[in-house]
Amino acid sequence: MSTVFVGLMSGTSLDGIDGVLADFAASGARAATPLRILAHAHADFSPALRAELLALNRSSADEIHRGALAANGLARAYAGVVESLLDQAAVRRGKVAAIGCHGQTVRHRPAEFDGIGYTVQLNAPALLAELTGIDVVADFRSRDVAANGQGAPLAPAFHRAVFVTAGKAAAVLNLGGIANLTAIGADGSTLGFDCGPASTLLDRWCAATTGRPFDAAGAWAASGRVDARLLETMLSEPYFALAAPKSTGRDLFDETWLEARLAAGDARQRLRAQDVQATLSELTARTCAQACRAYTPEAGELIVCGGGARNADLMARLARLIAPKSLVTSAERGLPVDQVEAAAFAWLARAFTRREPGNIAAVTGAAGPRILGALYPAG
């Protein structure tokens, strides 16, 4: 079987699609790294598709119909990224074992309502298989949820495979739309959970008040001042006090959540917009640092990946709060910050084809290890 896989990821931040073409030929107990990245591609969402995906995070009229069409649009965008990867690496599609495609999360409510709950990732994997002529592995989260797990985060098993040196503790923080931490002990024991919001609230506030889609390098936040009163109101959110396993998303941390906290402290009247941005940046840094102190006491460094690793203001706040731990990016450990999550889904697709579990029960709370995903053959 081929050792080459595609991984596709579009996350909570809705900044577009990242794809990698990864070769696991060198993977094994003695390998220095479990994969080699042959190509990386990014595609922004069209404004119309991004707006629709954002709208579908909330209940609205005719959402089954709209969601199905948005999923088709996603599949076409994913297929474009796959073609770009194949072109860059000059790899024939027949050489690719499978595409691991996460889809776009629009609802994440595990363990709620009936005790099982659900997680929904918009996707059209059958269409993606048709468009690319490559087998597609999709729907990674629902098997874990069916086993009473959170269905997230799923990256910790990959983080353990990529970033850990035997006998050494490690800590990995993904700063996407939501921040999630992986804590790995020197004995290999692994925990992981969502810390809370990262770029999802930062981007929403920036877009709403400046018209810019995001705060480049966190420069606007750096120009503001943290408001202790607003920060205290935000930190009182019960989610932060929950014990792991836990996961979250836009179902909780959206503009409604933010507006309620702003209203509670008369923040709109008292504060400049950049002060709110600075306070949101401090919120992410505080909640991540608190999680890091509690769950990764043995790790000498925190490895950061995801788009938030490019936010200089957020990284500076984190570095201050986790000292004397050092702060490094995943790029300094061999994998660029915008490739880690896509590579994780290439790895999960490989695990599926090998009939190996993709979850870690201690991370998600599932009843045990489970093979994650569903196969959509190319033909």
Image (tube, grey):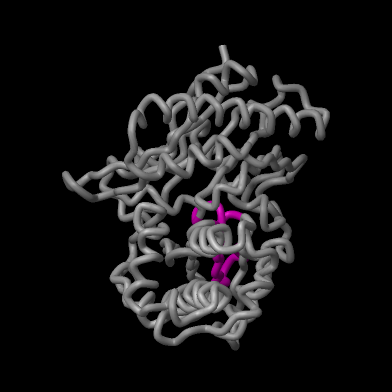
Give percent across and percent down for residue 329: 68, 67
Give percent across and percent down for residue 230: 41, 80
Quarter placement of the C terminus: top right
Please tell me whether residue 376 is drawn above or below residue 47 in the rendered image.
above
State the residue at coordinates (65%, 72%). 220
State the residue at coordinates (44%, 87%). 228
The tally of labels here is 0
Would residue 159 be counted in the magenta stretch?
A: yes
Quarter placement of the N terminus: top right
Would residue 120 be counted in the magenta stretch?
A: no
Q: Is residue 200 left or right of residue 21?
A: left
State the residue at coordinates (60%, 85%). 320
Please tell me whether residue 134 is drawn above or below residue 285 in the rendered image.
above
Q: Residue furthest front?
A: 269
Q: Range of the magenta residues?
A: 156-176
**Taking the image as drawn, is residue 10 in sight?**
yes
Of residue 299 and residue 101, the one placed in the foreground of this image is: 101
State the residue at coordinates (71%, 22%). 93
Give percent across and percent down for residue 38: 77, 40
Please tell me whether residue 88 is drawn above or below residue 240 in the rendered image.
above
Using the rendered view, name the quadrant where residue 46 is placed: top right
Q: Is residue 103 left or right of residue 34?
A: left
Q: Residue furthest top?
A: 379
Of residue 257 and residue 22, the one placed in the foreground of this image is: 257
Give percent across and percent down for residue 322: 55, 82
